[in-house]
Amino acid sequence: MEEIRLNNVPAVRIAAKLIKQGPNTVLMDCEGDEVWFPKKHVQIEEDGTMLIEEWLYNAKVRKGEL
């Protein structure tokens, strides 16, 4: 399997829908939970997914912020 990278660091792809954008942040619906992410650490894809740097995923998503 190909390693996913974003901004030259490991990343993961998750299902997410854009709700709102600020100047430096995006509010995403991640499986029914609304979470703010810094734009510089994510990439919103057209297929309803988002690439997120792995460290941020571990901090916000895996550790229970969702």
Image: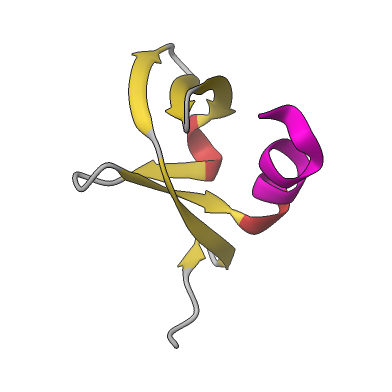
Describe the colour scheme in one phrase.
Answer: secondary structure
Quarter where residue 46 is shown: top left
Range drawn in magenta: 56-66
| Quadrant for the C terminus in the image | top right
Residue 44: quadrant of the picture: top left
On the image, the x and y values in percent for residue 7 come to: 51, 58
Q: What is the magenta segment's predominant secondary structure?
A: helix
Is residue 63 part of the magenta span, yes or no? yes
Q: Quadrant of the N terminus?
A: bottom left
Q: Is residue 29 above or below residue 7?
A: above
Query: What residue is shown at x 50% (from left), y 20% (from top)?
Result: 24
Residue 7 shows in this picture? no
Residue displayed at 47% across by 71% down: 4
Can I make out residue 17 in this image? yes
Location of residue 38 in the rendering, given as x and y in whole percent from the top left corner: 56, 29
In-front residue for pair 28/25 = 28
What residue is at 64 percent from the left and 57 percent from the top? Answer: 54
Q: Nearer the viewer, residue 11 or 17?
A: 17
Q: Nearer the viewer, residue 54 or 6?
A: 54
**x, y (%) of residue 8?**
54, 66
- Residue sitting at x 47%, y 33%: 31
Hey, which residue is sitting farthest bottom in the picture?
1
